[in-house]
Amino acid sequence: MTKHKIYTMSFATVYPHYITKAEKKGRSKAEVDEIIRWLTGYTQEEFEEQLEKQTDFETFFEHAPQMNTSRELIKGIICGVRVEEIEEPTMREIRYLDKLIDELAKGKKMEKILRN
């Protein structure tokens, strides 16, 4: 089976789009970074290393230090698909992140985004 092209894309090429989406709605890069660290378990330094290495999406999620167990609480529709129904694990992780960034851009409070 052919992998989706997002898997081979550098996370660093999409990351600025997450920031732009958040900033257009009055949110910050720091909040985007916090969401990514919460989801993946990367420290800020480890995350920045992944950006510098131009790590692809698949490797970025495969090497994540500790995927947050609360991510399974993320529900809803992203790109016309219900996140909780995505069977392919890597795609589900990517869509979890997309959903969290959407919630940030929609003005949701960080406590709720981070499922506290």
Image: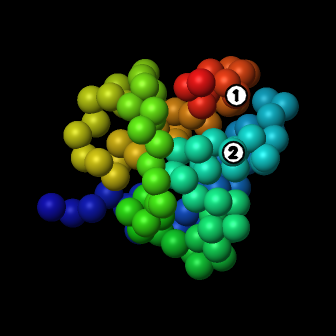
Identify the mark at residue 110; answer none if there is no mark: 1
Identity of the residue furthest to the right in this view:
26
Q: What residue does disc 2 label?
A: 34
The answer to which quarter of the image holds residue 80 is top left
Q: Amino acid at mark 2?
A: Glu
Residue 62 in picture, x, y percent from top left: 38, 63
Q: Amino acid at mark 1?
A: Met
- The residue carrying pointer 1 sits among few (fewer than 14), some (14 to 19) or many (20 or more) residues within 10 Å by Cα, namely some
Identify the mark at residue 15; answer none if there is no mark: none
Residue at 45 percent of width and 33 percent of height: 70
Is label 1 in a helix, a strand or a loop? helix
Residue at 61 percent of width and 50 percent of height: 37
* Left or right, residue 28 beside residue 93: right
Position of residue 21 relative to residue 60, above or below, is above
Residue 16 in picture, x, y percent from top left: 70, 55
The answer to which quarter of the image holds residue 2 is bottom left
Q: Quarter of the image for the C terminus: give it.
A: top right
Is label 2 in a helix, a strand or a loop? helix
Cα–Cα span, label 1 and label 2: 9 Å
Identity of the residue furthest to the left in this view:
1
Residue 9 in picture, x, y percent from top left: 47, 66
* 68 and 107: which is toward the camera: 68
Q: Earlier in the sequence, mark 1 or mark 2?
A: 2
* 116 and 32: which is toward the camera: 116
Do the residues under discs 1 and 2 have CB atoms within 8 angstroms?
yes
